[in-house]
Image (spheres, rainbow, N blue to C red):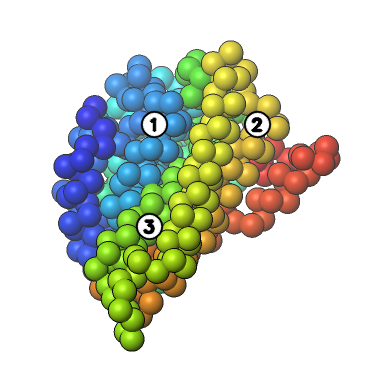
Amino acid sequence: MTGVTDSLVATVAARADEIETAGRLPADLARAFAEAGLFRQLVPASLGGGESHPRVLVESIERVSAADGSAGWCVMIASTTAAMSGWLPAAEAAEVFGDPLGVWGGAYAPLGRATREGDQWRLSGTWPWGSGSQNCTWMAGGAVCDDGVFRLLYVPIADVTIIENWDVVGLRGTGSHDWSVTDALVPVGRSVDLLGGSPVEPGPLYQFPLFGLLALGIASVSLGLGAAALDALAELAGAKTPSLQRRKLAERGTVQAEVARSTAQLRSARAYVLEAIDEAWTSAVDGHPPTIDQRANLRLAATHAAHTAVEVVRSAFTLAGGTAVRNDSPLARILRDANVVTQHLMVSPVTYEPVGRVLLGLPVELLDL
């Protein structure tokens, strides 16, 4: 595994316009990410995966997202979907996650229906948000099974129909089309009880809450976009002299102060994310799932990071003036992408309610964290 190299980041940045125009991650870039091990960061070492510390996940997604938000989002989706590899029985985990060039996607939402037939489930359903699906080898769909249990079921891409309807404001290059499955037979071992199940792998990574890992991955995209916005503004400010002004944008005191404030905001939010990870990791290393307080802290840090980053992006966009409104401006794309990220349920404002209940000592459903 080579991880995120400077060369790979430069390649992604150079192809950002192509990704946006194509409306998907190009197949050769998806393969490059797979070869770099980016999709297998949360796959167990026993299957040849990275079994990485969540900090590594955050930093890798952040770097790719700083080069292009859609590319970073595709890395996030594939890598967090692969976290379930630690929950499947060994034989099924090897089948789904053993391919070193595998790509995974899907949706947790329980929009499918599954009926038990012997040692298999018969699955049908339609799900939105199939990010990166055109490059996937396996898809995972949430379903309410006929025993009333909410499970995630993995199906090979051959069983999937992609409904090409992705036409959006931001994250255009993620190819997040709707997708459907009709009467696919899924071995029972390729399903995971998301509420009552437990990990098979013993490592600390698999003690982490799955939704917490997803939220951290989403926040990482936002952090990368925030950093990209500040870099784009710095480059522009050093070259641009606004109309009716004699000084370059970078020489204006208001711009200097706002850039400093935004940098402090973004770095503080990032530090909180890493602090929350480290606290939960300590419990996991000791063999204990993170506590309710730690789970809430992970979700709060991720949500705070996503919303702080979008504030930073908006500030950079505003400071750039009329230059930023052109569609060929990096800041225009970053603004669109950052605002779309915060629409995801895992980092939306609704997160504050269950976290607030925990902070106030009130009961909360684990599914909310």
User: Quick check: 345 left or right of 23?
Assistant: right
User: Quick check: 293 left or right of 245?
Assistant: right
In depth, the one of 247 and 55 nearer the eye is: 247
- Element type at mark 2: helix
Q: Residue at x 19, y 49 (%)?
A: 10
Q: Earlier in the sequence, mark 3 or mark 1?
A: 1
Residue at the spot of label 1: 56
Residue at the spot of label 2: 294
Tell me the mark number nearer the camera, choosing from 3 and 1. Answer: 3
Q: CA separation, marks 3 and 2?
A: 31 Å
Callout 1 amino acid: Val
Q: Position of residue 361 (x, y in %)?
A: 83, 37
* Residue ranking furthest to the front: 246
Q: CA separation, marks 3 and 1?
A: 22 Å
Q: Residue at x 24, y 68 (%)?
A: 239
Q: Is residue 107 above or below residue 336?
A: above
Residue 130, quarter of the rendered image: bottom left
Q: Residues within 10 Å of mark 3 (few under 14, many from 20)?
A: many
User: Quick check: 301 left or right of 34?
Assistant: right
Callout 3 amino acid: Leu
Residue at the spot of label 3: 230
Q: Residue at x 20, y 63 (%)?
A: 18
Residue 350, visible in the rendered structure:
yes
- Element type at mark 3: helix
Callout 2 amino acid: Gln
Q: Is residue 199 above or below residue 11?
A: above
User: Quick check: 359 left or right of 16?
Assistant: right
